[in-house]
Amino acid sequence: MLLEHFDVLIVGGGLSGVAAAFSLQKHCPHKTYTILEARDNIGGTWDLFRYPGVRSDSDMYTLGYSFRPWVGTNALADGSSILEYIRRTASENGIDRKVRYHHRVTRAAWNGAQAQWRIDVERGEQRQLVQYTCNFLFACTGYYSYEEGHSPPFPASDRFAGAIVHPQKWPAQLSYANKRIVVIGSGATAVTLIPAMAKTASHVTMLQRSPTYVVSAPDRDRVVDFLRRHLPMPLAYRLIRWRSVLFGIVFFQLCRRYPVAIRNFILRGVRRALGADFDIASHFTPRYNPWDQRLCLVPDGDLFKAIKAGKAAVHTGQIHSFTRHGVKLQSGEELPADIIVTATGLNLVVLGNIELVVDGKIIDPAKTISYKGTMYSGVPNLGSVFGYTNASWTLKCELTCDYLCRVLNFMDRSRRRVCVPLNEDPSVVPETWLNLSSGYIQRSVDRVPKQGSRRPWKLHQNYLLDLLMFRLSAIDDGVLRFSNPA
Ligand SMILES: Cc1cc2nc3c(=O)[nH]c(=O)nc-3n(C[C@H](O)[C@H](O)[C@H](O)COP(=O)(O)OP(=O)(O)OC[C@H]3O[C@@H](n4cnc5c(N)ncnc54)[C@H](O)[C@@H]3O)c2cc1C
């Protein structure tokens, strides 16, 4: 059933879908658009994840939108406050009225003769097939599977008598008060969950194969409080946001240039928090350099406090098998548990698993090169959002959305209906897109588009460089080709 035509279809009603809609309304007010969202709610990540303590791990001054100040008191915010913030942004700007829920996009087929996408959608619980057409497709689908998280098989897991829970599907009724918990994993989710559960659990053990860098950050920032007290909110927010951006860039560069010094600095912080007797070498000293994987921020050192108070502990070792009453390690030791939480990560997916077809030919995203981190070589009239790996997602998301609006306006002005990035420079070498060694990225490296070795195919992971590229560079750069159907 063919439903409607829109100038732009946005897929995904998360933080990025709302940003994309805001940009379109602001910069291309004449364009018709709608948002197709697979779930029954707006907010994406911040609606899906409901585990105890769920929060941001980057500051809200940069994870929040530039156009709507984050007025919360804490730099790292809890999931429900972020969800509320996204919802309010959508409703204040009339974006919520543009969302069609229970619309899962499964296929997008480009017809070059008509310069249009035909979008296949499964609608509602019956998964009724409906179709839309649009001139430009905007994928704001996030980066991981909503179906299920990464759950590696553990030997004898069926023998365990208690509950095994993955943070992506947290059972609302799960009671863990006075229970012994083992959390498998050492990433952002594990370090968030552990202090939150330790408040009421009898004991929580973090069981990790190898350590991660964990850095304590003040939950409340005195400079932020000062600026907010003395300056009008919009100005204060701008300054606070820029301070966070610059701090993040400088810290990342220091990690890259002086990894040993930064490593020692981070480990000194852990030692100060846990005391000289704690085995920091085994449990908090990763084998990689800072920012080879995302750092884990813990507000006011809450994880360290839970460990010091004896409410939580860290074990570093390999799992042998699950037992009836817990987890047996290869060392022979057994960790008793009533509940096991498998904080083992996400399954990365590309473009919301939408099958892309261009003039009858199925596109393998892994064979494309990403243009400016948003479009794909050989794929016309398609943009997507993928945030930074070393800074807040929203920074890159907003640059991308505004840039795609520039492209749309350029096409209108120059009366051309098709844009497609084409790489005809033999000196551009395809490289891995994502610059982190984290498990979920390495597991998916064969399915993800590449980046190129040179501009405009190179991903900077640097807000300042991207700001120049997205805002100031010519739209018609000879690589992004513009045309009309024959
Ligand atoms: C627990 C957790 C904490 C995080 N903390 C931070 C942080 O502190 N800082 C940071 O920068 N990033 C963080 N991230 C990354 C986070 O995902 C991004 O910050 C941001 O929320 C991504 O927004 P998005 O809208 O691009 O994607 P998502 O939030 O994933 O939303 C995507 C939306 O698209 C919909 N969708 C997907 N495929 C389809 C389809 N085929 N058809 C229709 N709809 C579809 C989904 O249902 C969803 O609503 C975190 C991620 C997780 C999981």
Image: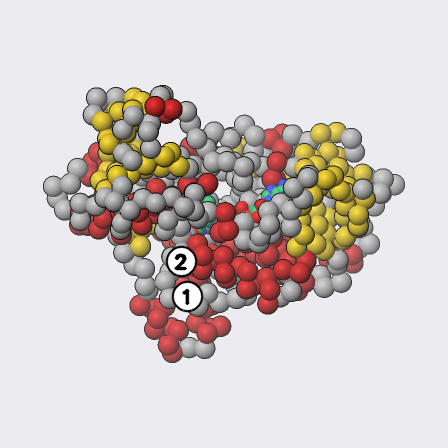
Residue at screen point 17% across, 47% down = 308
Would you say 303 lies left or right of 82 here? left
Would you say 178 lies left or right of 27 here? left
In-front residue for pair 427/397: 397
Q: Quadrant of residue 291?
A: top left
Residue receiving disc 2: 77
Three-letter code, disc 2 = Ala
Residue receiving disc 1: 72
| Residue 472 x %, y % | 61, 57
Would you say 192 lies left or right of 453 here? left
| Residue 379 x %, y % | 70, 38
Q: Report how far apart the C-alphas of labels 2 and 1 lie in the structure.
A: 8 Å
Would you say 166 lies left or right of 332 here? right
Residue at screen point 60% across, 50% down = 40
Numbered label attached to residue 384: none
In-front residue for pair 18/178: 178
Q: For numbered disc 1, what is the local secondary structure?
A: loop
| Residue 150 x %, y % | 46, 33
**Res. 218 in view:** yes
Q: Is mark 2 within 8 Å of ligand 1?
A: no
| Residue 360 x %, y % | 78, 30
**Do labels 2 and 1 touch, CB within 8 Å?**
yes
**Res. 483 in view:** no
Q: For numbered disc 2, what is the local secondary structure?
A: loop
* As drawn, 397 above or below 92: above
Colour pattern: secondary structure
In-front residue for pair 447/185: 185
Answer few, some or many: residues within 10 Å of disc 1's Cα (few below 14, many 20 plus, some between 14 and 19): few
Q: Earlier in the sequence, mark 2 or mark 1?
A: 1
